[in-house]
Image: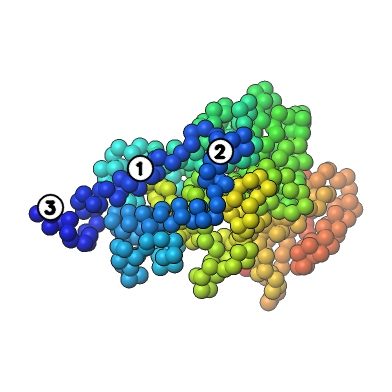
């Protein structure tokens, strides 16, 4: 009877025949046996991957895509349904050349799957037995865009891999033995904090957990224990710098030399980057991922890119762990290298959640040119450009919120916090920006002058007539996590 089972094509999810188990074990073995626990060179942690030829990187991606497709076919009810609906069979994906056959996965499919199959949904290829012994932890999205946050489990193996990925990124940024880190992300269910925490631990870098305490306590930690690496959202890193100054501690003279920022695009917004680097007298780096598909750094800046002053930094993509596609949103076909398109990512390593072709929703342009640092993997030109669902259309002009941030923060007499409101008067869009002065202004005529000069400058930078309101310093809320600055009331 066993022989008969083996000769049958797989039709039932979760069937435990030998062939099935062998494929899954191959996947798990691959997931576990690829790490370098220590850096290989003085500058690059995993040079065999980070400096591989394009052909070698693609060969690796090709093998992984084929294997993960098989694993998902056999073990993920969600993907089996998707593949069958698309008319695919178990052998449909043998290499990267077949990637276009795989249907795209959208964020809303996740919620529907979890609502229909509570509490976890049917994405993961792990079995009930696996979950009993793989040391899972729960993570969620922030839940700001959807009604409910999306919920995930990741295993101990996954978290070990995040540590290695994160360590490679931090090493590229210049984090080394002798550094001390203060990690100012919330100690919650988001993946970014944990991934960076595990990465620092793998590197042997001492960590001061900066979550769950206020800015005054963090300032004390910085002053007394002299961390050299500060991790947080760009908004918070800026706020913390100001608060240090108010407490009589000069952030420019502090021990902090590297700023590792995640959660917002600030490290690739030139005027925000300049403001933050000036505040801290430190180099600011970008680290981005995506809770659903790229839990560890998908993108990170190296020292060469972070040092750029004349242009937005380009961000390295960890292509040995993620397959990055840039597609035309209308046709879902790849755009040419260097052209802007929609970012679609496949996770090529995860044990709990190897997702294929997930639509992250960001606009991106990439280059395959080798970087001056020696790494050969693709880079996102100027980082992520913005999310397609955030693209604003104001009086016929289209731009991302980051463009407004860049414009406002480029005005030297304007403070760090600002709010943008979009309304309509009749048929016409109206944009209002509320700002604080950079320094206390004595009288009303100075506030009026700042209003007029800011309105003039923003019209020139954005091409849109903008009403500016100047409010006293300290009136606008200070940001402690991800900033909410845009209110579209149209
Ligand atoms: Zn580089």
What's the CA distance linking mark 1 and mark 3? 25 Å
Which of the labelled discs sits on residue 45, or is there none? 2
Residue drawn at x 37%, y 63% as measured from the top left: 93
Position of residue 70 measured from the top left corner of the image (x, y, whole percent): 32, 57
Position of residue 129 measured from the top left corner of the image (x, y, whole percent): 25, 43
Relative depth, front residue between 84 and 230: 84
What's the CA distance linking mark 3 and mark 2? 47 Å
Q: Residue furthest bottom?
A: 427
Q: Residue furthest top?
A: 224
- According to the image, label 3 marks what residue? 2
Which of the labelled discs sits on residue 271, or is there none? none
* Secondary structure type for disc 2: loop
What's the CA distance linking mark 1 and mark 2? 21 Å
Q: Residues within 10 Å of mark 2 (few under 14, many from 20)?
A: many
Residue drawn at x 41%, y 61% as measured from the top left: 95
- According to the image, label 1 marks what residue? 29
The reply to whether dot 1 and dot 3 touch (C-beta < 8 Å) is: no
Position of residue 37 measured from the top left corner of the image (x, y, whole percent): 48, 33
Position of residue 480 measured from the top left corner of the image (x, y, whole percent): 62, 42
């Amino acid at each position: 009877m066993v022989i008969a089972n083996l000769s049958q094509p797989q039709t039932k999810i979760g069937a435990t025949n030998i062939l099935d188990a062998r494929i899954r074990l191959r996947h798990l073995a691959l997931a576990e046996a690829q790490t370098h626990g220590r850096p290989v060179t003085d500058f690059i942690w995993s040079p065999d991957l980070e400096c591989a030829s394009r052909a070698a990187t693609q060969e690796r991606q090709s093998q992984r895509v084929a294997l993960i497709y098989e694993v998902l076919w056999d073990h993920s009810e969600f993907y089996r349904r998707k593949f069958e609906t698309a008319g695919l069979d178990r052998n449909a994906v043998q290499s990267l050349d077949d990637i276009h056959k795989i249907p795209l996965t959208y964020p809303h499919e996740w919620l529907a799957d979890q609502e229909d199959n509570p509490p976890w949904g049917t994405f993961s290829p792990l079995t009930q037995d696996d979950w009993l012994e793989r040391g899972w932890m729960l993570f969620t999205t922030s839940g700001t865009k959807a009604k409910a946050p999306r919920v995930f489990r990741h295993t101990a193996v996954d978290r070990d891999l995040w540590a290695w990925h994160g360590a490679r990124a931090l090493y590229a940024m210049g984090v080394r033995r002798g550094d001390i880190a203060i990690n100012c992300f919330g100690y919650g269910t988001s993946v970014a904090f944990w991934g960076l925490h595990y990465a620092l631990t793998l590197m042997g870098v001492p960590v001061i957990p900066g979550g769950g305490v206020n800015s005054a306590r963090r300032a004390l930690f910085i002053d007394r224990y002299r961390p050299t690496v500060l991790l947080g959202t760009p908004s918070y890193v800026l706020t913390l710098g100001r608060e240090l100054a108010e407490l009589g501690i000069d952030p420019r003279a502090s021990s902090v030399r590297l700023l590792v920022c995640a959660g917002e695009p600030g490290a690739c917004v030139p005027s925000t980057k300049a403001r933050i680097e000036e505040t801290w007298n430190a180099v600011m780096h970008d680290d981005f991922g995506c809770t659903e598909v790229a839990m560890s750094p998908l993108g990170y800046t190296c020292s060469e890119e972070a040092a750029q002053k004349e242009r937005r930094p380009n961000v390295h993509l960890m292509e040995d762990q993620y397959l990055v596609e840039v597609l035309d949103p209308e046709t879902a076909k790849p755009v040419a290298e260097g052209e802007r398109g929609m970012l679609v990512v496949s996770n090529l390593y995860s044990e709990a959640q190897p997702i294929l072709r997930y639509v992250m929703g960001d606009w991106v342009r990439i280059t395959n040119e080798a970087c001056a640092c020696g790494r050969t993997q693709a880079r996102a030109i100027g980082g992520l450009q913005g999310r397609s669902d955030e693209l604003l259309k104001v009086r016929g002009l289209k731009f991302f919120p980051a463009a407004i941030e860049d414009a406002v923060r480029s005005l030297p007499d304007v403070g760090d916090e600002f709010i943008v409101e979009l309304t309509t008067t009749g048929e016409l869009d109206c944009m209002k920006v509320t700002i604080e002065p950079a320094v206390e202004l004595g009288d009303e005529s100075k506030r009026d002058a700042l209003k007029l000069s800011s309105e003039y400058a923003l019209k020139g930078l954005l091409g849109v007539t903008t009403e500016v309101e100047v409010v006293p310093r300290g009136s606008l809320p200070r940001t402690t996590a991800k900033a909410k600055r845009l209110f579209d009331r149209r």
